[in-house]
Amino acid sequence: MSAPPLLRLEHVWVRLPGDAAPTVRDVSLEVAAGGSLAVVGPSGGGKSLSLRAALGLLPTGATSGGRVLWRDEDVTAWPAARRRALLGRSIGLVCQDPGGSLNPVLRVGSQLDEVLARLTDRRGAALRERGDRLLADVRLDDASVWRRRYPHQLSGGQQQRVALALALAGDPELLVADEPTTSLDVPVRGEVLALLDALRAERGLALIHVTHDLALARGRCDRVAVLARGAVVETGATEDVLAGGEHSVTRAFVAAAASAPPRAAPPPGPPALEAVALEAAYGDGPPVLRGVTLRLEQGRVYGLLGVSGAGKSTLARVLAGVLAPRAGALTGPAAAATRGPRPVQLVFQNPAAALDPRRRVVDSVAEAAAAAGAARPREEADALLRAAGLDAAAARRHPHALSGGQRQDAALARTLAARPRVIVADEPAASLDPPSRLRLLASLEAACRERGAALLLISHDPELLRRCADRVGVLADGIIVEEFAPGAGPSHPLARRLWNAAAPPPESGESPERH
Amino acid sequence: MNRPRLHVLHLGAAMLAAAVLAALAADLLSPAAPNALGDAASRLLPLGQGAGGLGTDVLGRDVLSRLLHGARTSLLVGLGSVALTLLLGGAVGLAAGLGPRWLDRLLMGFTDLLLAFPRLLLALLIVMLSEPSRLTVILVIGATGWMGTARLLRAEALGLREREFVLAARGLGLGPVRLALRHILPHVAPLLLTAAALRLGNAILLEAFLSYLGLGAQEPLVSWGAMIEHGRRHLLDAWWLSALPGLAITWTVLAANLLGDGLRDRWDPRAAGKEAP
Amino acid sequence: MARAFLRRLLHTALLILALLTTAFAVAHLAPGDPLDRLAPTDLDAAGREALRGRLGLDRPLPEQYARWLGGVLHGDLGRSLENHRPVADLLVEALPRTLLLAGTAYAVHWLLALPLGVLLAARRGAWAVRLLDGVGLMLYSLPMFWLGLMGILIFARLLGWLPAGGMISPAAVLEGRTPPLDVLRHLILPAGLLGLATAAGSARYLRTSLLEALGSDYVLAARARGLSERAVLWRHALRNALLPLVTLVGLDLPALLGGSVVVETVFAWPGVGRLAVDAVFARDYPVVLAVTACSGVAVVLGNQLADLIYGRVDPRVRLDGERPR
């Protein structure tokens, strides 16, 4: 690389107030003018914090050290005012939660004008004109409409566009995007990422893209830095890293980013639970499910795909017996309402949350076993936990004293102890990083096939279902629009749109949608 | 980060322990009987004189002894009423938070209604129509103070109700009672304790004012509020008769508040709101 | 828009009805014979029954309730047992004085709490915060009536700067005047005390609210966009932190009314609180019942007003009708 580095971090460390050990231990990375760097790593690894330290935006009470160089000058030695002047003018920041980054009580136009007034010399009509152009840049045409809106009146994607406009108001040379699309729906992610690429090309921006999805780096970033447990474990050109990293963490992320191999559809198994023409709603509200029919088979994985708000969680609750349907029936061995644990068990977004934080793990599992009628619940609990990789000592700990992976394993053991016939996983592990998520899903899948339980995987992410499901159903407008095998793919247009809604790589030539 | 707050907790606990000690050992520690009248020569003795060194009041009674016995009244009323508050507030709050929607609306509607009245006026209204006594005061203070605790507990129960581990427990087929006892109560207990400590201060202050008005524990029981009223007429020449009991009240209430603050910071650092629960 | 307003009006009316009923219930469901407390002890059996009849206490409870409620809705709050004047008249006389006291105290409370809250949040300097925190806690723990007495001792008796109680000096009473400056002098101690006592709690609440706002994502984003620290604090953080304070009126008002009772008693301020306490001693239960009921109504109305204001001020509510969680 011949271009000089624009921003460089050297051995940066950060300790949060009240912590004994620093969260960020030793981070060194750099990005060149006009270049792009992806910062990848598991949650809690210190990605966001390192960059906040570089920008001088640490939370109160945090201490930090190391050098931060902007165009080869050490900004940590600068007076505070000069350092702050970098923000907005030289470096722009876009954060993960678009709604959260906008002041809820001020209109979009007001927030835009305020930033422009601070960062430029324009006033009056010239100021407004500049603002309108910024909005057009982020593909929000008809500025007068957008200016009048309050943040809560915008969709997630629109909010993120406004945040981008604000970040670019001062014409910075570097944009730091901290997980900009993680909170958005999968279809919207593609649009925002395409916008990001277009803006970069138009303005010659340098980019630091923090993400836990390595796939996003492909075609978008020249280099990748992998951060784990507060330190950079590997850096390199994107192609090299994707071809095969050296560090174990890197390899886990590469594996998670790889496309799923095609699966052959297994023969249908005996029925576990059948839903016939289910209709459901909340209270007296409008109908959410309008006649859903599907069939879950023992030892098979059924994937349910749909956008947020399509009714996937409602369906999960009806199947689990938590919500009574207005019409329709549930039949099959798993539909019988018995005393004790429900035959259809729910697994949550963060499965480990099913463990009572005040009880020891072995007690929680034993409770489930006892409810399922086990003769010796404690022994069964120990056995299940051992099979999940937790020895007797670990089993006697509380959830917070275990590692993230151990917690997930323990929660799974608990679910299995209840001897379910069907497991419904609603957006499973959505809050985990890709390698952890894959690991969890693999365990879940294996456990189900072993025990002959049916597994229903609900997600808005088609990639996940591509990997794990034997059959996929698409839920839209309250019904199952189409069912298909992942290898084959859907034919219904709506289903196709959802199934293929991965982020388009920049070379595809698709221009971002305009509003 | 937790270090400074631990001091607050210990300080509060120590101060409260001192008050409790005074209350329990009042008979032992008092140099004179609290209601023993003095002869003409030993009335209105200033500080430094008298059996306890803190002077005597208009009737010749030793101030120190009365202060010590006053602790007994304040703490008995305080702790008694707080226990009642916790019981009522806990029951209502948990029922509203964990039960069906209509029960929640009914209970919270009633609670909000009572919250609209200034507590003091409600207390006065009730006390006016009953026989003033220590027991009445306990009941009145307890019956007018449970609403805040109920709201707090309801909010907590509503939050817990949707937590994954509670849903998971329900998925095991556990009935509502077992669920409440095994999973909800352990989570709610620290909050109840913190609420108790914070409520104690308010209860003691209310008791003091009611006694000041003569509506609290009656003679021969000693009360700090009544002592303050007694000293009111001699504010200029015997100011310590009113000042000292006030300091005693402040000590005890401060102790309770420090304890409550410390507990709250330790167990739930997020909630640092205005109103004592 | 009009429909929502009508619904709110109906809801408020029902609430007031429920309040009045509750007040009545509390007064009449207390155990024991009310006559034990209300009648002089030397009255014989016949005299007591006559008194009971005169007070209307021999009627069945629902009838008593209906008569009382009917009266209230017509503005008739009964007659004082002590001086036989209509309670409504007594209230109308005393109310402006309480409003003066409570209103001034509330203003003082905000004048103190706002800058204090902002100061505590903006400066994270350890010792300043801890000191003010400690002072605040002390204020919160002092018995207000005792503090009032000590105030009288120091400022009235010892120093002689301020009057010891009442609303106007005896000289003016004799002349039948109400000189405003004189009233002001008498107002300083009681209103100052009440304001000070309640300010501590509000300052702490404001500080928490402000700290939360300062730690929020949009403040971080505002800083990242290059805005000055002043703009961040005032335009972004404070604005958002002050919003929930409007709803605090719901908690403030009962506390303020209760505090006025204490302060008026200690300083002999001739307001509604003093009226109530005097009535308690005189066993004049119609007065106490009326004061209690009316304060409840005042709080409810105050709450509704606060809700309306909040609805206009927070765009999330104004446009969508839903309070953000």
Image (tube, rainbow, N blue to C red):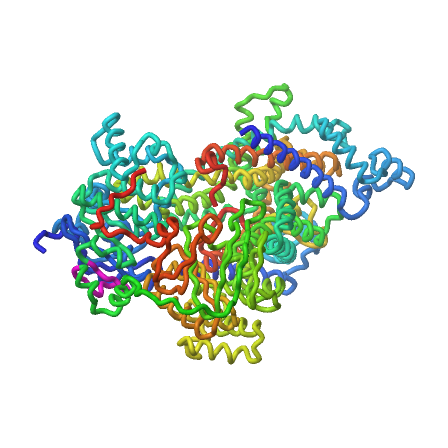
Residue at the farthest right position: C46
Image coordinates of residue A399 in percent, x first then y, are 44, 68
Nearest to the observer: residue C312 or residue C293: C312
Residue at the farthest left position: A2
Image coordinates of residue C243 in percent, x first then y, are 45, 38
Left or right position of A121 against C274: left
Picture quadrant of residue C172: top right
Main secondary structure along the magenta-highlighted residues = strand
Q: Is residue A235 magenta?
A: yes
Nearest to the observer: residue B94 or residue B261: B94
Q: Is residue A24 magenta?
A: no
What span is colored magenta in the figure? A224-237
Q: Residue at x 47, y 39 (%)?
A: C245
* A138, above or below C79, in the image: below
Picture quadrant of residue A195: top left
Q: Residue at x 40, y 38 (%)?
A: A153
Number of numbered discs on residues: 0
Left or right position of C100 against B7: right
Left or right position of A120 against B196: left
Q: Residue at x 44, y 35 (%)?
A: C315
Nearest to the observer: residue A124 or residue B131: A124
Image coordinates of residue A282 in percent, x first then y, are 55, 49
Q: Residue at x 66, y 41 (%)?
A: B121
Q: Is residue B74 visible?
A: no
Image coordinates of residue A507 in percent, x first then y, are 20, 50
Nearest to the observer: residue C254 or residue A253: A253
Q: Is residue C219 visible?
A: yes
Left or right position of C103 against B43: left
